[in-house]
Image (cartoon, rainbow, N blue to C red):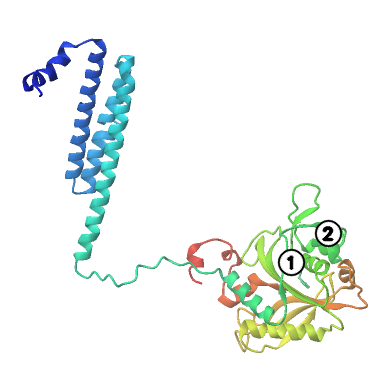
Amino acid sequence: MSDPASGEAGTPGEADSNTDSSADASADASADASADANTLADAQAKIFACDDVDALKAVEREFVGKQGVVAQLLASISKLPPEQRRGVGQQANALKQGVQEAVQNRQQTLAEARVAADRQGEGFDASLPPPRPRRGSLHPLTQVTRELEDLFQSMGYTVLDGPEIETDYYNFEALNIHADHPARDSHDTFFCEGDGHLVMRTHTSPVQIRALETLKPPLRVVVPGKVFRHESTDASHDHTFHQMEGLVVDRDISVAHLVGAMKTLLRGIFDRDLEVRLRPGYFPFVEPGFELDARCPFCQEGCRVCKRTRWIELLPCGLVHPNVLRAGGLDPDEWGGFAFGLGLSRLVMLRHNIDDVRHLLGGDVRFLEQF
Ligand code: PHE
């Protein structure tokens, strides 16, 4: 049988009578801990009473802000006897964690309550689709490139890619433009640091050689891509622009094949048949070489686009020079071909009536949003 009297006497009395220094310390610590628990309970009560985010922020600041309760507790540590420091540090951290957790929970509850209130509100329709994310659009150069890739693929061409940093050999030498050749003057070249052996490609034509080296004839390829020239820029010149190279190699290729392919290309671009004409043009990697003009698709009697000539200069082209076929490892007596260099940037400008080439790569969103 228990003795209620001794039991009652046993609780606080015994502790008192057993007092020694270590019991003192633990009594101190537990007093601190309960003070701290009170602080946490106090904080939780305050947090729970908050009805909006601002109030919640204020309570959060009161406890875990720069001058808050936790900060003061931590600041007091240095003045405590060493054996108490650890305990107080832990308490401060526990308080901080407890407060932050409670703030988070309350925040979520408030957010959920707001959504629930909105749902009760007038005009809410749960069956409406969520707002769509804003979509961008393809760059006009990308649009034209993809259209032309489709068109050429439908004619049996393969789309190829090539490096934008080229060797002197592929960019010039193998294309029959030797080191002292005056044609190099027309390509204002960016040379990469070093011995001048690497250049930013000045045209997409080097991929002609790469195609000859890797594919077996007969072959038809197009190569869209960026090219670079060391130019002072103005409305019609930029240091970076886009071309699409075309190369066809087969037996018995003539200028008629070239003209036929170009007319098909024009039909694809302008949606109708356009008259074309060839003027002589000089490029060391074609022989004969031409500038191909098309009837101005925008007027009958001369306009700003065709500079009142009724012809627009569309692309340089020609029959592949025997030296180029040789550089690609082919026998020019057996194989022939034609090549063309379509200016994609110019084509985009024509299509959208853009008067300054620098808009294309200028990155101005107001320009790009129009497409
Ligand atoms: N690569 C030439 C240039 O950029 C254009 C071209 C390509 C000419 C193919 C003829 C044949 O100037």
The residue beneath circle 1 is 204
Q: Is there any visible trace of residue 289 in the rendered image?
A: no
Compare marks 1 and 2 and give the one earlier in the sequence: 2
Relative to 293, say whether 28 is above or below. above
Residue 297: % across, % down? 62, 85
Q: Closer to the camera, 268 or 310? A: 268
Mark 2 Cβ inside 8 Å of ligand 1: no
State left or right for residue 124 relative to residue 251: left
Q: Closer to the camera, 81 or 279? A: 81
What separation in Å lies between label 1 and label 2 (alpha carbons)?
13 Å
Q: Residue furthest left?
A: 5
Relative to 324, say whether 260 is above or below. below
Q: Quadrant of residue 5?
A: top left
| Amino acid type, callout 2 | Tyr
Residue 267: % across, % down? 65, 86
Residue at the spot 91% in from the left edge and 75% down from the top edge? 332
Mark 1 Cβ inside 8 Å of ligand 1: yes
Q: Closer to the camera, 319 or 163? A: 163
Q: Is there any visible trace of residue 84 in the rendered image?
A: yes
Residue 18: % across, % down? 19, 11
Relative to 131, say whether 36 is above or below. above
Q: Closer to the camera, 53 or 164? A: 53
The residue beneath circle 2 is 169
Residue at the spot 25% in from the left edge and 34% down from the top edge? 63
Rendering quadrant holding ligand 1: bottom right
